[in-house]
Amino acid sequence: MSTSSVAGSTQQTTATPERTRSLGIARNLGLVVALVVLCVVGLITAGDRFASSNNIITILSLASAIGVVAIGMTFVITGGGIDLSVGAIVALSSVWASTTGTQAMAESVGWIVIVTTAIGVGIACGLINGLLIAYGKIVPFIATLAMLASARGLAEIIADRKTQIIRDQAFKDALGARPLGIPVIVYIFAVVVVLGWFLLNRTTFGRRTFAVGGNTEAARLAGIKVQRHTVYLYALLGATCGLAAVMLMSRTQTGSSTHGLMWELDAIAAVVIGGTLLSGGRGTVTGTLFGVLIFTTLTNVFTLNNLSTSVQAVAKGVIIVVAVLLQQRLANRST
Amino acid sequence: MSTTTPRRRLIAIAGLIAAVPLALTACTNSSDDGDDTSNASNTGSGDNAEAGDTVRIGFSAPAADHGWMGAITSAAVDQADAFEDVELINAEGTNDVNLQISQVETFINDEVDAIVLLPFDGAAMTDVATRAMEAGIPVINVDREFDSPFAARSTVLGDNYGMGVSAGRFICEQADGNTDAVVAEIAGIDSLPLTQDRSRGFSDALKDCGLKVSNRVAAEFTVESGERAAANLLQAAPKIDYLWNHDDDQGVGVMAAIENAGRDEFVMVGGAGSANVMRMIEADDTVLKATVIYPSTQGADGIKLARLIAQGKSMSDLAEVEVPRVIQLSAPIVTKENVDQYMDSAFES
């Protein structure tokens, strides 16, 4: 694994596209297998209840908010960073965007105020993370750990530890709509996945991300403004957290300082299972999508079978290990 | 951290006045039934209400980071304020066991007259509470029990098992002999004893009328986890007759999931008793028809008991000349019929 990452990063500008593509397919194969196995188990044990369109929509809706965060996380981890504060940022964004003040403004200006507030708060938190890491030279683990604590704390202060109900009907209508029977948030998730894939694989921004994550020094020598790029990455993740907060507000119709508890771990797990290298330099949006879907489907299948959360936790652990082992095997064979 | 936050959101609300007038008022004539508006902080009347020797009471509870703990602490402070002979030393709420231990040590060094302690973790606080007792300071243990009976002079507890029983009985009543009814349950954090107690009470009560829980999921006491668990549960059970959700805080998410799924074929019972839920029960326009109370005035009761013990008084409603060792509060069911009685004591989640 380490050799391929070094190779991938140093030859970033020339040899990567083809190489990563073939690697990517092999890597994702393990995930596809895992997801298919889960679906087969679901079909056998729960039959129609699993295969019903309603259930599939439920799975996709549940995957949407955490999925958007995981896509953002893919960028940060690919860029060699880590962000432990995503859950807290989601909480803070949701709380900030659902205060009576914001809701009153939304009443007069429009529901978009709630959305922009949430995303704005997310970006602001991401910027702070990024600036501390890039220019303050604080390691990402520590800087975002600090953000984790203070963002959730601030959320508690603003919300006064209460659950804030969203009363703005226009917001509820807009985000609760179901064009073609599918909730808006699923479309949002789909758009984010497509944009994320394009941004990472088809743009200069994406190539810079690989370069920065693979070898910071080489990237710097190659003329990439590493610090500025790092700030962008965290701000991007902050924006996805804000968006996830909007989606969560639409689903739960609340803003709360308890939103997004432990999401940092769920998001990191989904990203890493997907095949993104925790040390940076290699990342895949498609893999992350599968990672998120696998976890969400797992919970769904277990609930359909009325199994306890403890069993679920064990299965989750096993799946993480099996999926990673599968990826390694398949990736090794293909190289 | 995640195991602590939910735990405190658990408890909500205060049906105490009607449920346990005796614990609350400690008076000779229990004059304050449901008509008392100042619910939690009543000084009661009769001999015990009269100011006695001034007592200094140390109070320590976990951080008020959710509605329930906020209500616990504010009810305790209000209760102390209501007595002119109580001087409350309120330690800053903390989820750090180490810090809470040092708070109690400070109380011991200060030689307070009594300590009211809602431990973050009962087991971890047992030793320091025992030391306080050995130093001659009575400790009133609230909600989360110590490991040792020697660590507390008196203990005030909610009734988690009773919550399950109340919810189960209500559903049995509604089912009225129909043993084919599909009953679903959305529990809190499964690893917590309180969740296990609630579930046990629930299934025991259902067994009495030939019902059982067909579908069960566990959430994490947060709105978001409630929404997630309920969304999956509603897919697992295409038709539900009765649904019990352990906690009204996560219930906000559960209600959102029900609305998202467009389901309304069942009767839902809540747990804890937040003001929000009380209003829904009163309005009677959702599937939510009842909730079960878990009083948030336990801290206030702790203050009352601490005062009595420190002043050497007894609970004059009882023949017993000492304050009892354990007081367990009732977990009544709230429906449209009696919601008025509990509305005032409910707090915003």
Image: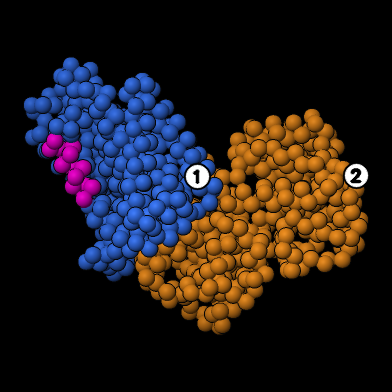
Chain colours: A blue, B orange
- Mark 2 to mark 1 CA distance (whole Å): 41 Å
What residue range appears in magenta?
A191-203
Residue at the spot x=42%, y=50% of the render? A102
Residue B326 in view (yes/no): yes
Residue A228 sits above or below residue B166 on the image: above
Quarter of the rendering containing residue A251 = bottom left
**Residue B69 in the image, given as x and y percentages of width and height:** 62, 49
Chief secondary structure of the magenta portion? helix
Amino acid type of the residue tagged 2 in the rendering: Asp
Please say whether residue B167 is one of the residues in the magenta stretch.
no
On the image, the x and y values in percent for residue B51 come to 89, 50
- Give the camera-side residue of B239 and B252: B252
Crowd tier of the residue under label 1, counting other residues whose Cα lies within 10 Å: few below 14, some 14–19, many 20 or above: some
Q: Residues within 10 Å of mark 2 (few under 14, many from 20)?
A: few
Residue designated by label 1: A158
Instruction: Give the residue furthest to the bottom.
Output: B177
Q: Which element type, helix, strand or loop, lies under badge 1? A: helix
User: Circle 2 sits in a helix, a strand or a loop, which is it?
Assistant: loop
Residue A169 to residue B242: above or below = above
Q: Is residue A200 left or right of residue B65?
A: left
Chain letter of disc 1?
A
Q: B166 and A70: which one is in front?
A: A70
- The residue that mark 2 highlights is B53
